[in-house]
Every structure is written in structure tokens, then in C-alpha cells.
């Protein structure tokens, strides 16, 4: 992790990233209480991992199986589209200011994950 990524992650945590990640962990834990909610809970944990320290991480969508595609379609209809749109709108608002552009780009990364979380992988990278 570079120094700029570290500084970006620190500012991200201070200005809401920590509370957002804790919210995703809580949502994931609540979803995992039921057997049918476990796949959704695992996706919530994936969001928490990205939201905690988004700078220096990349979301890859390359390993989409037929099961992932079906689950993503169901996800989109039951809240994924709203999550993706809200992240994209926050990204646009952040990008309006020059200082907020790095944070806006992270919101766009989260919008992509919010739209297609099943089969997506989060890895260290640019």
C-alpha cells in the first residue's frame, strides 16, 4: 500500500468508512442467522471488506458462473439497483469538488460491486 492509499484510507475511515463497514458487518451477521440468508450475508461481508479500506483495492468481475448470474439478477431486483445508484450518486457529488474526486472514484467502485456482488472478487491492486 502506498502512502497516498494509506492517507486516503485514513481519511475514509474518519469520515464515515468505519461506521459504514460496521453497518455492513451487522447486516451480514443478521442475514447469516437464517440458512437462506447466508449468501446475502456473505455479500454484505464482501461490502464491509471493501468499505473498510477501499483505496488500493480492485473489484474483479471475471469469474461469473451461471449461478452467480442468476443470483445477481435476483440481487438487482431486491435492492442491488438502489444500492448501486446511491453509491453512484454519492460518487458524482464527491467528484463535483476537486478534493473529493478520489473519494468519488471509490464510490463508483462500490457502485459496481453493489450492482453485481455475486462472483465478484476484491483484490489488492490499483
Image: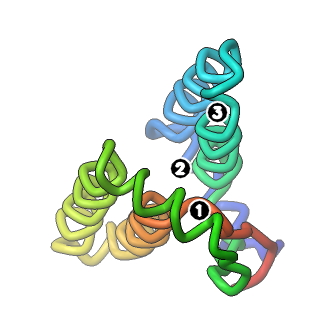
Looking at the image, which residue is at 51% across and 64% down? 70
Looking at the picture, tell me which residue is in the foreground, 47 or 56: 47
Give SS at disc 1.
helix
Number of other residues with Cα within 10 Å of mark 3, as a class: few under 14, some 14 to 19, many 20 or more: many
Q: Do the residues labelled 3 and 1 touch (CB within 8 Å)?
A: no
Tag 3 and tag 2, C-beta contact below 8 Å: no
Q: Who is closer to the viewer here, 106 or 77? A: 77
Q: Residue at x 46, y 36 (%)?
A: 16
Q: How many marks?
A: 3
Q: Residue 109 carries which label?
A: none
Q: Name the residue that disc number 2 marks.
A: 12
Q: Dots 1 and 2: beta carbons under 8 Å?
A: yes
Marks 3 and 2 sit apart, C-alpha to C-alpha, by 23 Å
Residue at which label 1 appears: 8
Q: Residue beneath label 3, please?
A: 41
**Earlier along the polypeptide chain: callout 3 or callout 1?**
1
Rendered location of residue 32, percent (x, y): 69, 22
Label 2: element kind = helix
Whole-number angstrom distance, CA of label 1 to CA of label 2: 6 Å
Horizontal placement of 109 versus 87: left or right?
right
Q: Measured along the vertical axis of the image, is residue 86 above or below residue 3? A: above
Judge depth for marks 3 and 1 and give the one in front: 3
Amino acid at each position: 500500500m502506498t502512502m497516498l492509499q494509506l492517507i486516503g484510507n485514513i481519511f475514509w475511515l474518519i469520515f464515515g468508512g468505519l461506521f459504514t463497514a460496521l453497518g455492513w458487518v451487522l447486516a451480514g451477521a443478521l442475514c447469516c442467522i437464517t440458512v437462506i440468508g447466508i449468501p446475502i450475508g456473505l455479500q454484505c461481508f464482501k461490502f464491509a471488506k471493501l468499505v473498510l479500506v477501499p483505496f488500493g483495492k480492485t473489484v474483479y468481475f471475471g469469474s461469473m458462473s451461471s449461478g452467480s448470474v442468476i443470483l445477481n439478477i435476483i440481487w438487482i431486483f431486491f435492492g442491488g439497483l438502489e444500492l448501486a445508484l446511491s453509491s453512484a450518486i454519492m460518487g458524482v457529488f464527491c467528484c463535483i469538488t476537486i478534493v473529493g474526486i478520489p473519494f468519488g472514484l471509490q464510490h463508483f467502485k462500490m457502485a459496481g460491486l453493489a450492482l453485481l456482488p455475486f462472483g465478484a472478487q476484491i483484490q489488492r491492486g490499483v
